[in-house]
Image (cartoon, rainbow, N blue to C red):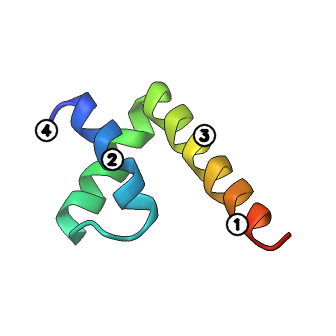
Amino acid sequence: MTNWHIEERLSAYLANEVEPEEKDFIESHLETCANCRQELEFLQELQLSSKCFCYR
């Protein structure tokens, strides 16, 4: 799996829609890749803000 696959799978990772083996791979990759961690943080903030927006 290459980096771009990681970025494509981060949304599924956040939604717990990945298999355990893929989850382990993603988490291992996130430990070493600042770009993917930054993308994950962005998606987490987006997810949080969309939840806040829905409750207004």
Mark closest to the chain's N terminus, 2 or 1:
2
- Is label 3 in contact with label 2 (beta carbons under 8 Å)? no
Using a 10 Å C-alpha cutoff, classify the residue at mark 1 as few (fewer than 14 neighbours), some (14 to 19) or many (20 or more): few
Query: Residue 28 bears which disc, if any?
Result: 2
Q: Distance between the residues labelled 1 and 3?
A: 14 Å
Give how far across and how far down residue 40 sits, in percent.
Answer: 51, 43
Q: Looking at the picture, how far across and down is residue 28, in whole percent?
A: 33, 47
Image quadrant in which the C terminus is located: bottom right
Given the image, on which type of amino acid does mark 2 rest? Ser
Residue 29 is left or right of residue 20, and the answer is right
In the rendered view, does 19 fall on the left or right side of 47?
left
Label 4, secondary structure: give it: loop
Disc marking residue 1: 4
What's the residue type where badge 4 is placed? Answer: Met
Amino acid tagged 3:
Phe
Q: Residue at x 40, y 32 (%)?
A: 32
Q: Determine crowd level at label 4: few under 14, some 14-19, many 20+ residues with C-alpha closer than 10 A.
A: few
Dots 1, 3 in contact, CB < 8 A: no
Indicate which disc residue 51 carries.
1
1 or 3: tag closer to the N-terminus = 3
Tell me: residue 56, above or below residue 27: below
